[in-house]
Image: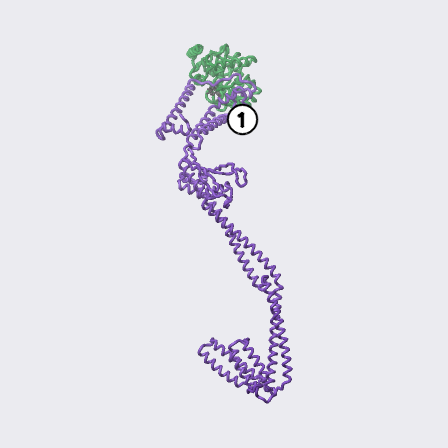
Amino acid sequence: MEQLEKAVAKARAQRRIAQPGERRSPGENGTVFARATPPVYRETPVMPFRPAAFEANKVVANRPDHPVADIYRSLRARVQQRLLRDNRRSLGITSPGEGEGKSWTAVNLALSLALGENQTVLLADLDLREPVVARYFGIEPKLGINDYLQGRATLPECMVNPGIDRLVLLPAVGSLGNSAELLSSPQMSSLARELKQRYADRIIIYDLPPLLTVGDTIGFLPNVDATLLVLRDGKTHAGELRRAVELLAGHELIGTVLNAVH
Amino acid sequence: MAVMELERPTDYLAAFGRRKWLVLLVTLSLASLALLVATFWPPIYRSSATILIEEPDVPSDLVRSTVSTFADERLQMIEQRVMTTQNLIGIIDKFGLYESERKTEPMAVVVEDMRDMIDLGVVSADVNDPRSGRTTRATIAFTVSFDSNAPRTAQQVANELVTLYLSENLRTRQEQAAGTTGFLHEESSRLAGRIEELETQLAAFKAKYAGSLPEQLTINTQILDRTQSDMLEIRRQLQAAQERQIFLQAQLAQVDPYSTTSVTFDGKPLLSAADRLRALEMQFLSISATYGPNHPDVKKLKREIDGLKGAAGGGSDAVALQERRQAISTELAQMQEEHGAEHPDVKRLQRELSNVEAAIAEGANSASVAAASPERPNNPAYIQLQAQVNAAEADIAALKGQSIVVEAKLTAIEQRVMQTPEVERAYLEMKRDYDQTVQKYQEVRQKEGEARLAENLEAESKGEKFSVIEPPALPEEPVRPNRKLILLVGFALAMAAGVGSGALADSIDDRVYGQRQLAGLSGQPPLVVIPRVRNAGERNRVWALWILGVLAVVAGIVAALAYVHFMVMPLDVAFAMLAERFKLRF
Ligand SMILES: Nc1ncnc2c1ncn2[C@@H]1O[C@H](COP(=O)(O)OP(=O)(O)OP(=O)(O)O)[C@@H](O)[C@H]1O
Ligand SMILES: [Mg+2]
């Protein structure tokens, strides 16, 4: 808790320093990576999360005393271990169907990782049909990944710090309808590549759409180093699970998470 | 399809955990249904009577009862007669049964329902059969019962049914006995008719072969003997007459037909033959009209006249005959006028007149013969002899005639006697038939008498009869339903159904539950298992729901109790009723 409050206070201070006008400089597009200097999050605007949103969305990984936070710490350890062993840095989180807890798991895992020692985390919301990551944090960013994809903003401009150390969000703003072609587009591949190259020690977590209902989720998977499959207890049908496992056969599946067990 | 078979006890526990609401819902609703059924199923009361089938009072070998069907069969027959739709409708009307049902259902359905409520049971026992001396299982009594939701109705209807059974038994037995009597009576009158027929046949036979009948054989033989002796006698007389004729003819040949003397041997003036003839003829006409031609006097006169005619050269005096005719016809006309045509005297006169006219006609014929005759003999001795010869000739003729008649008679009698054995055979045959029929008739008559006696026996119900040894009582406790059993079974079924529905739901549910199933399907156990997380709002909502639910249940119970208490019956009464229904004792 203390840590959290500190983070909040810090975020507030930073917001006072950072002026909105400074973040938007025309013609920066394409040169953003050349200019980049560590630590990145200092450049990233801070929008502190609302604890009420965490409470409402049952985000618990930041609560040290919560038993589920413990579980996330163990998940964090296993994910870190599996990724760093093979020098992998990006992790796509998906599930066979909708509403199984992909976003919730992604947020909790990202939080848990960031709150651990020495691990910077980028959480990118790639579920462009219905982006929820910003909502989970209770923030309303002006720009999102869709603005970047449509060339209206640079990538750093789209990023936001929710007021937690070592955690940067790349949210999406508003629904984009058919993300079908977008996810498997070369533009997306270059985005993934850029994000990976930019910070060497950062873990990138992608909140992806469902695997079976959205056609090109599978098309994005070659851009990630590993995949985590979330299944909701008593919701996923056996057949869906089998098909999902089949689809993920060639894509480094580091494991499954059985979510929302009664 | 279940994702995986349940293997460990924990699997079952987990499965129950995820189906607990379904299991609970099904179990509770079925259990409360059972409770409702057990509580509100209307009580059915049964009233039953036991009826003993009694042996006849009169020993059966004394008067053999014609009703010999077995008690079971008869019971069935009577049941069919009692259970007619008509009878049942009668009972329904009498006691106003099934009133509400009758408004909606056709009568046939109501009667069918009523039939289901009637029960007939037999009571059997090992009895010693006095006739065969063996022990057999026999129906000695039966029970009739009626089920109704009102104890009094049950009793009343059972009573009515018992009455029906008793009277139907009586009627059936009487009918059967009467049926036997009727059959025997019919048979006896048929035989009587047959006897009558045979009798007429016999009579006709006797009439046809009258005289040849065996019992007449002796008489026939006697007659035959007598006729034969008659015949001999006639032959003897005939011979005598012929001898006399020959002798007289010999004498006649020696006498001269003509003589001058007109006196007889004793000196009396001798009537000429013609005068005598005339007198005789007058006498004959008169007599033959009075008597028939076969009268001995008439015959004698006729013979004398014939003799005289021969002697006198025939022909009566035509003048005298004419005069006589005149007189008769005058008298006839007078008599006819006085007495009418049918009077015997008139008839007699008519016959005389026709005789006289015939004589006139004959006289005219013979007058020519007489005229042709040269001369008539006038010697009285000769004439007398001549007359005697003529008489002898007539005697011969008569005897010959007699002998022919007797001979014919003799042949006829001989014929009859010869026929007798053949007639006897046919006659005996008919007689045997007749006798047999009569014997049979007598037997049947005797049986009929016995049957009539037995019928009277039945009528006085001295035969095998029903007697009520246990009349229908007013039932105190319902026979149905067994509420505790309904509850027990109902609860057991409810639980089974609950668990069953849970198992079914789990078996057709192909969603993934638990890490074991997940591991089985994905090939590896999950990295982590994350429980379902609730925030404060959700926790509160769950609490609120629980509290609301409990409150609702409590409020529902209170409301139901209040409704019962104020709208149906006071709770203590209701409680007492329930205790009584479930036979709870405190
Ligand atoms: N373990 C959990 N405990 C309680 N609630 C959970 C849990 N996991 C997810 N949820 C809730 O389930 C809902 C759906 O979760 P989430 O949005 O993460 O699903 P998703 O897979 O991302 O769905 P979509 O396909 O729409 O993106 C959210 O309201 C979330 O709060
Ligand atoms: Mg999502």
Is B179 situated above or below B243?
A: above
Look at chain B in the picture and name its colour.
Answer: purple
In the figure, what tint was chain A given?
green
Residue at mark 1: B1
Tally of numbered discs: 1
Q: Amino acid under label 1?
A: Met
Among all residues in the image, which is located at the extreme left? B566
Q: Is residue B279 left or right of residue B393?
A: left
Element type where label 1 sits in the image: loop
Coordinates of residue A239 in the picture (x, y in percent): 54, 24
Nearest the camera: B66 or A28?
B66
Q: Residue furthest bottom?
A: B260
Give the chain letter at badge 1: B
Look at 56% across and 56% down and name the residue there: B434
Could you say where residue B214 lies in the image, as x and y percent from the top left? 59, 61
Which quadrant of the view contains residue B365? bottom right
Around disc 1, counting alpha carbons within 10 Å, would you say few (fewer than 14), some (14 to 19), or many (20 or more)?
few
Would residue B313 be found to the left or right of residue B535 on screen?
A: right
Expressed as whole percent of the image width and height from the top left, the position of residue B364 reads: 56, 84
- The answer to whether A242 is drawn above or below residue B442 in the figure is above
